[in-house]
Amino acid sequence: MVLRTRFPGEIPNKFATQAFIDEEDRQLALFRTFRNSTNPQAIELNTWLTTPLGPSGWRHDLSVTDPLVHYGHHFGRTVHALCNFQALLTNGILQMGELADTPEENFTAEERREHRIFQELLKSVAGLEERLMQGGDGEVDIVAELLTKGASGARGDDTKSLKGSVLDWITPKGQNLVPPLARNMKIDHGFHHEQTGALLCPAGIDWSNPETKTELRSGEIIVTGDQWPLFLYADYRYDPEDPWNGLCMAYKHVFTSPSSVDREPKATCSGNARIHGMTRVTLPSVAYIAMQVRFALTSSPVFSHTDTVTDSERFYNSILDVFEDPDEKQEVDNLVVWWNRQVFPSYSTAQRPLAKNSALVRIREKRAQMKELQVPAASSSRSTDFLLLG
């Protein structure tokens, strides 16, 4: 039996080799005592120690308490929703180590994007880089498992909660959907229903054409992930010159609180954004909400990013591709400002101009005047220095 002793938060070389050996001997002796004991508590502890998986094992307890699961929730929603953490960590460590001297242009665009995501992960989780670099392959597996558990868990929670809420949002006030849509089954959603079909219809395809509806419902017209649905556009009208609109309700539902959807947002409302200190919209989070709403409207019962029918992964990545396109920067920046004003009330306050006669304005004016008086003297001194050096 090999015992791996860990000292969380410490640097291994601070401990003498003999200290590890002595500690291993003590732990092994203790484990043998537990294994041979008939005490119920000892039996329970022995089961926990020897069962890494399942509800009674140590890995289950670790996944419940480890903060990486908590961060995985936020990472999946705001950085990358469909990330393969095992590949992300493995490739990221390679680029920090063996491939550190490789020029950036030697990597593909996808590899560069993946490494930016990896760096965002390291920046956001204190101590993760040290944990990965010192922990070995086993540590990479555990970290990947915890982050995956967090991201997939959050995605599942959002998928479940949005399924019914989206139906409420697409139902005209004071009216009912005809025919009604079930909240717990999706077989009659998607192109099979007039309302959801109109919202999912790809831009450029005429939903009002009966022949088009028949072909979409039968699958004769195959809709791929890079064919964006009409609900992404303002007033559900396709206009490539305008930024996307219409997802604000879903964004509030996930990031502020479900109850904030039907009322003016308050700076005190609780939700995932506040829990994680989020005060601005991230572009991946907009793509995430678009993906979730699109799936909620479809007839597919179970979310799977490898599902070629909903093609969710391709849809999500196609939005990110546009967001990251340098040629679209101006439009994307305008879109971010619009989203921030809709979702985060403090953002609008921060962007509000100062009152002309406020004390703060007078303080800044006074400071500017003092700086102006100091500039001539400083300039004169610098000129003399240059003359002397010349």
Image: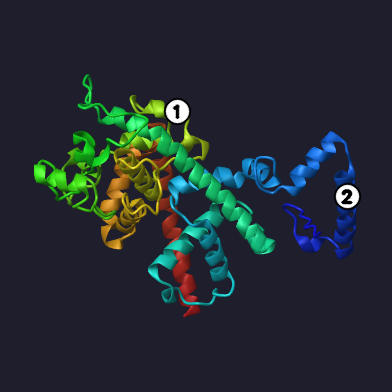
In this orientation, which residue lies closer to the viewer: 189 or 81? 189
Q: Of the numbered discs in the image, which one, if any, rests on residue 299?
A: none
Query: In the displayed structure, does residue 142 sit left or right of residue 336?
Result: right
Dot 1 or dot 2, earlier in sequence: 2
In this orientation, which residue lies closer to the viewer: 349 or 362? 349
Query: In the displayed structure, does residue 115 sit left or right of residue 61?
Result: left
Q: How far apart in space, not on screen, are marks 1 and 2 (Cα)?
A: 53 Å
Vertical placement of residue 227 versus 367, above or below:
below
Q: Residues within 10 Å of mark 2 (few under 14, many from 20)?
A: few
**Residue 19 in view, yes or no:** yes
In which quadrant of the rendered view does residue 263 lie? top left
Quadrant (top left, top right, bottom left, bottom right) of the N terminus? bottom right
Question: What's the amino acid at mark 1?
Answer: Cys
Q: Of the numbered discs in the image, which one, if any, rests on residue 269?
A: 1
Secondary-structure class at tag 2: helix
In this orientation, which residue lies closer to the viewer: 31 or 332? 31
Q: Residue 270 placed where, x, y %?
A: 47, 29
Residue drawn where x is 20% and y is 44% of the image: 217
Question: What's the amino acid at mark 2?
Answer: Arg
Q: Residue furthest top?
A: 174
Q: Residue 332 placed where, x, y %?
A: 29, 52
Q: Residue 19 placed where, x, y %?
A: 88, 59
**Residue 357 in view, yes or no:** no
- What residue did someone put label 2 on? 32
Residue drawn where x is 86% and y is 63% of the image: 16
In this orientation, which residue lies closer to the viewer: 58 or 13? 58
Residue drawn where x is 54% and y is 59% of the image: 86
Secondary-structure class at tag 1: loop
Q: Nearer the viewer, mark 1 or mark 2?
A: 2
